[in-house]
Amino acid sequence: MASPTSVIFDVGRVLFDWNLRFLYERLIPDDEALDAFLRDVVTPEWHFQHDAGRSFADTSTELTAEHPHHAELIAALAPQFNETIGPAIPGMTELVADLHAAGVPLYAITNFSGEFWPPFRAREAEFFAPFRDVVVSGDEKLVKPDAAIYRLALERFGLEPEEAVFIDDNVANVVGANALGIHALLFTGEPKLRTDLRDLGFAL
């Protein structure tokens, strides 16, 4: 494969830490009750519907019907979603800045709700300023690792597969990108990623 010239990042757990627990541990003080709520009510699997393009109004209505005694906690997710997102992953602010300074085109493909993305991006406007474009799954109603979202992103970014390196913390997403001819790296932390990018020819 030819050496890539552009970098495409995942967002959650690559650029920024994310966990539903970050919000709900503030709202549910009892550890056992918190664990049960995240296991049985507001689960990652339920939340993934938002990444796939379903509205919070629809999903929360359905979930509240199943768990009416948790109505207030379920409703809290939408206005407080930014509280599920922690700080930038250590070293990633600096890595993004270094790539941008080197003139590397930066992009992202994220499994993220189309409703929740704009407030988060506004919160982190400075961080995302170097990014030329971001494909958000909830807006497209396509999710990684579906090949269609990678094809759409490449077309939108004006890239051939071999021109891009894609970074994700999810093995399935990495495998999906690699199957299309994209250089794909599994994210395990900034030090290893920086080394991997150097090995691919990026001046860092």
Image (cartoon, helix red, strand yellow):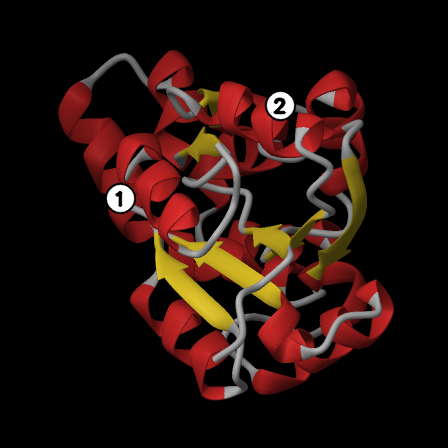
Q: Amino acid at mark 2?
A: Ala
Q: What crowding class fits label 1: few (fewer than 14 Cα within 10 Å), some (14-19), or many (20 or more)?
A: some
Q: Is residue 66 visible?
A: no
Asked if one can make out residue 203 in the rendered structure from this viewpoint, the answer is yes
Q: CA distance from mark 2 to mark 1?
A: 19 Å
Instruction: Identify the residue shown where x is 73% and y is 41%.
Output: 117
Q: Give the percent coordinates (x, y) of residue 138.
A: 72, 60
Q: Position of residue 132 (x, y in %)?
A: 82, 45
Q: Nearer the viewer, residue 25 or 141?
A: 141
Q: Residue at x 59, y 76 (%)?
A: 162
Q: Is residue 44 left or right of residue 78?
A: left
Q: Position of residue 20 (x, y in %)?
A: 41, 35
Direction left: furthest residue? 32
Secondary structure of residue under mark 2? helix
- Dot 1 lies on which element? loop
The residue where tag 2 is placed is 97
Please name the residue shown 66% across and 32% down the image. 102
Q: Is residue 160 left or right of residue 143?
A: right
Q: Which mark is residue 162?
A: none
Asked if residue 122 lies left or right of residue 199, the reply is right
Crowding near the residue tagged with mark 2, few <14, some 14–19, many ≥20 C-alpha atoms within 10 Å: some
Label 1 sits on what residue type? Thr
- Residue depicted at x 53% and y 50%: 10
The nearer-to-camera label among 2 and 1 is 2
Name the residue beneath numbered marker 1. 188
Ranked by sequence position, the earlier of labels 2 and 1 is 2
> Quarter of the image holding residue 96?
top right
Q: Nearer the viewer, residue 144 or 153?
A: 153
